[in-house]
């Protein structure tokens, strides 16, 4: 899905936990996430901290959309 | 000489539990359960040294730790053959089987697995493991096990195997073999067949690479419209469009222009992960709340009015491709500048 959407020339970030798969399929902008059942959350954290974590992941992904890449690239924290 | 076999299974086939046990830490036991009990009687002159069981999520999230555990067991049990799966079309399991095989391969152990052709784990081990061709679902276990047993039996005995006769995925290695006709003769025959529209078979299939060029970055985020999409099966409570929980046949879009968060009104129907945490707060899978905040702060122009969702477990690659084409077309026509797509 990521690749087909990008084929239209729209930058897209894949936010995924098993980034090896994402990378091998050929997603160009990848943000590694927390865990499979909660990629953008962490129920073990207090709500406020969990939200901060989510916000930071989303902010990183949005910034990745504005970053030039020349092939599959992971945006680590 | 009797060869020693070590098995690897995930938490489900190892009898530990379902999705709620996907965080199960790797363990080793000498007693066999599940698929290995069906493989062993037909696997020729081999004996089992035991079985490693590991939760699929644990492997995916603690790959180095799990691989170290597998390496330790291999060192202690000294197997000749390592058998992982079959994983059918289970992506996380296939990925784990491939990773486990990699450890065994590096230790000089022959590796056997079983996967469906679209399993994303396949390409990570196809070149060095003998991966039996299986159907896409465990309902075909009865057909998968004899193929794996046959491979183990022949490899243990040092017999020759071929992808066609023994139903495994070609490893992409070239081997020297003796044939009756010279290369030039074979090439001319192939060319004539092609010119005459007759069937012919290439001796060296070319790999196909499908690379999508990275799209140009967004120049001004503060004016950009960003869309959310997910393969995590997020839908409004009650699943009004009946999105499938696995092997999706469709995608859906939902209007979120009036929402600041998904919590309370949306949940997941994805059948491939423990939904408890997502159903408490769907923003844990599709982070509308945080993206909306960025809009309010002026860091992005706006969140696109609709989000797109499908279920990414057991879904055929061809379907996923089609969904992406259809969704991408809509986004392009709507003037969306960028997309965040989450996967579980």
Image: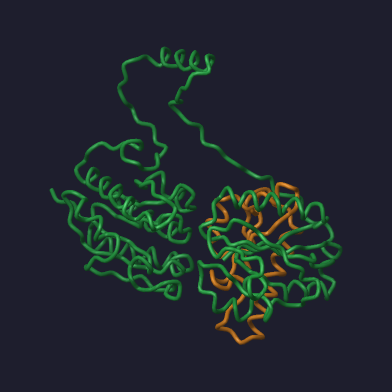
Coordinates of residue B62 in the picture (x, y in percent)? 45, 68
User: Closer to the camera, B174 or B56?
Assistant: B56
User: Closer to the camera, B69 or B339?
Assistant: B339
Could one spot residue B216 in this view of the protein? yes
Quadrant of the rendered image containing residue A44: bottom right
Image position of B166 with respect to B72: above or below = above
Coordinates of residue B22 in the picture (x, y in percent)? 44, 71
Coordinates of residue B246 in the picture (x, y in percent)? 53, 62
Quadrant of the rendered image containing residue B268: bottom right
- Colour of chain A as rendered: orange
Question: Residue at position x 72%, y 72% from top?
Answer: B288
Question: Could you tell me how many numbered marks the image carries?
Answer: 0
Image position of B161 with respect to A45: above or below = above
- Colour of chain B as rendered: green
Look at the image and name its color scheme.
by chain
Question: Residue at position x 20%, y 59% from top?
Answer: B48
């Amino acid at each position: 899905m990521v690749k087909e959407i990008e084929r239209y020339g729209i930058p897209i970030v894949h936010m995924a936990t098993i980034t090896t798969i994402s990378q091998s399929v050929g997603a160009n902008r990848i943000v590694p996430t927390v865990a499979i059942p909660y990629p953008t959350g962490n129920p073990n954290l207090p709500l406020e901290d969990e939200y901060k974590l989510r916000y930071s992941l989303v902010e990183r992904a949005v910034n990745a959309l504005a970053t030039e890449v020349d092939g599959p690239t992971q945006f680590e924290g | 000489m009797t060869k020693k076999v070590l098995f690897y299974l995930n938490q489900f086939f190892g009898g530990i539990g379902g999705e709620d046990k996907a965080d199960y830490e790797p363990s080793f036991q000498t007693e066999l359960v599940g698929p290995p009990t069906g493989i062993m009687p037909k696997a020729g002159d081999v004996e089992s040294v035991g079985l490693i069981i590991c939760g699929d999520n644990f492997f995916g999230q603690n790959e180095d730790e799990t691989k170290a555990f597998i390496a330790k067991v291999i060192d202690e049990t000294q197997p000749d053959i390592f058998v992982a799966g079959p994983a059918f079309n289970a992506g996380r399991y296939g990925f784990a089987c491939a990773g486990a095989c990699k450890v065994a391969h590096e230790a000089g152990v022959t590796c056997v697995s079983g996967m469906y052709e679209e399993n994303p784990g396949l390409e990570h081990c196809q070149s060095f493991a003998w991966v039996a061709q299986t159907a896409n679902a465990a309902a075909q276990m009865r057909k998968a096990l004899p193929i794996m047993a046959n491979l183990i039996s022949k490899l243990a005995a040092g017999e020759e195997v071929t992808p066609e006769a023994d139903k495994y995925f070609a490893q992409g290695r070239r081997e020297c073999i003796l044939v009756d006709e010279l290369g030039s003769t074979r090439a001319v025959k192939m060319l004539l067949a092609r010119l005459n529209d007759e069937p012919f078979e290439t001796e060296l299939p070319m790999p196909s690479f499908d690379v999508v060029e990275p799209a140009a970055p967004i120049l001004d985020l503060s004016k950009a419209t960003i869309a959310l999409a997910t393969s995590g099966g997020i839908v409004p409570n009650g699943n009004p469009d009946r999105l499938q929980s696995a092997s999706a046949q469709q995608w859906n879009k939902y209007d979120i222009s009036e929402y600041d968060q998904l919590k309370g009104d949306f949940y997941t129907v994805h059948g491939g992960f423990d939904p408890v945490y997502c159903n408490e707060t769907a923003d844990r899978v599709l982070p509308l709340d945080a993206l909306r905040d960025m809009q309010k702060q002026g860091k992005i122009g706006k969140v696109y009015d609709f989000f797109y969702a499908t279920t990414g477990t057991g879904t055929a690659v061809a379907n996923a491709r089609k969904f992406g084409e259809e969704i991408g077309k809509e986004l392009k026509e709507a003037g969306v500048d960028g997309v965040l797509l989450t996967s579980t």
